[in-house]
Image (spheres, grey):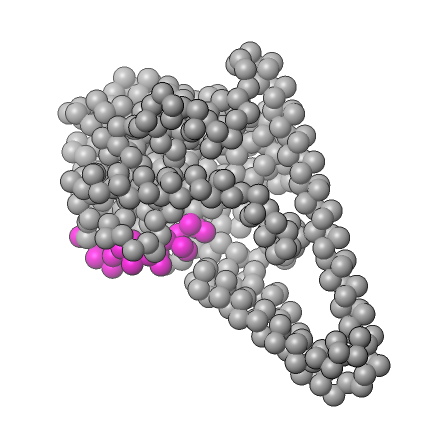
Amino acid sequence: MFFLKKIFSPLFLTLSLILLSYIIYKSEIVWSGQRLSLYKFYYIFSFLLIIFSILSFFFNSKIKEYILISLISIFCGLYICEGYFTYKNYQLLKFVSKENDKKIQDLNIGNIDKRSKLKIFEDLKKSDKKIQIVVSPSNHLSSKEKIFPLAGVANSKTIHCNENGYYSIYESDKYGFNNPNKEWSKNEIEYLLLGDSFAHGACVNRPYDIASVLRSLTDKSVINLGFSGTGPLIQFAALKEYFPLNVKNVLWLYYEGNDLIDLSKEKKDPILEKYLIDTSFVQNLKNNQKKINNIVKKSVKKQLLLKKKKSNTKLIKFLKLNALRVKLNIFLSENNQLDIYPITDEFVDIIKYSKEFVEKENSKFYFIYLHNYNIENFIHKNSQYKKIKDLMNKLDVPFIDIHKNIYENLNLNEIPGSFKNRYLIGGHHDNNGYGKIANIIYQSTK
């Protein structure tokens, strides 16, 4: 104990400075200051620790002993809380999985596929050497590659996700998107879709994704440029790179759960940044598909290796008090109405540039607002909803509110989607949910 008391003050000061440095790194470098209101608490806490550690140099040995005992007790208490929340999350996941299995069985979908994505990839690879998994373009952020891919490997069966008892698998088109290749040869395109996983068609197969349902409703061509894990800047880049001739309507599917967060990361990429700085900039990706295939395949290998090392990440999350910090972030954001997802100038510019680009091509631009639901927050509370709606009115962009048109008068159990989707943040829709969204879009734009 004597040795610990002797090194207590310098060690405490050193750790406090390391903590402050880490907070600055996360707040200013990782998030580019976009979540400053959330990190304000951590800044105050770290500054108080530094002041306290400096004062501790003047404490006598007895006080240092009491402080040391208190800190050890607090440290143990934090990890007990972390263990409790980790266990509760595990129990919730088990409950959700069990209830979701019941729902799937009631629908007579068939056997429930409980394989991991790594396992199904290894199984399917035996019969199809070209099989791929979905790797988000966001995995290429700040890479050293000379081009930035906006989709996947072309002309390959691609494994997406499993939230409804089966893995959705699609045949990618000649540019790596979720389309039949024949859609690109049509003389007129009724709809062009932009967006993240919801536009992509996450966790359902054709013909139940939004693009396929729109093809069925209109009996016309629909091009889907949506891709999982993308934000507004990547989606704007896809619009610039892959816009075909004779498009009647462009549908921008915005998801409030993470699009603004994704944008805060995307705008730091040197290649993506060029799309904002120079509105005429393009990478000519249509003519670089071989290079894109090679880059994405390398990324697929990295993702598969990460999945094999997944057990290590669980330990790291525990050591970083991940579950406890998530609870703290929810408390700070909901109870103090912190503006943690600000609408930046870049977002405004992207929508404005997209509208101008689309209208110059004699097409109509629509903004479809998709809400984020989970068991604790079914009543919509997102602070940015009204601001974004007002922004679209100001920019004269037609605003299609999916919540108002479908979910406003429903309770949680009536939402179309798997049981898992209703209980976990970020869940996707089932066949029925995507169908309802497509019908609202069709009715609102025809």
The residue lying toward the viewer, choosing from 32 and 446, is 32
Q: Main secondary structure of the magenta part?
A: helix
Residue 301 highlighted magenta (yes or no): no
Vertical arrangement, residue 92 with respect to residue 264, above or below: above
Residue at 80% over, 75% down: 1
Q: Is residue 412 left or right of residue 219?
A: right
The answer to whether any part of residue 326 appears in the image is no
Q: Residue at x 81, y 70 (%)?
A: 69
Given the current orientation, which residue lies at the most extreme bottom position? 58
Please state if 67 lies on the left or on the right of 251 as rendered. right
The residue stretch that appears in magenta = 260-280
* Residue 272 belongs to magenta span: yes
Q: Residue 172: horizontal and vertical position, in percent?
A: 30, 28
* The quarter of the displayed image where residue 55 is located: bottom right
Q: Measuring 17% from the left and 25% from the top, which residue is drawn there?
A: 185
The percent position of residue 31, horizontal first and vertical second, equals 46, 60
Q: Nearer the viewer, residue 73 or 233?
A: 73
Q: Is residue 27 left or right of residue 445?
A: right
Q: Which of 243 and 47 lies nearest the eye of the viewer? A: 47
Quick check: 224 left or right of 263? Answer: left
Q: Position of residue 17 (x, y in %)?
A: 58, 75
For the C terminus, the image quarter is: top left
> Residue at 27% across / 17% down in the picture?
219
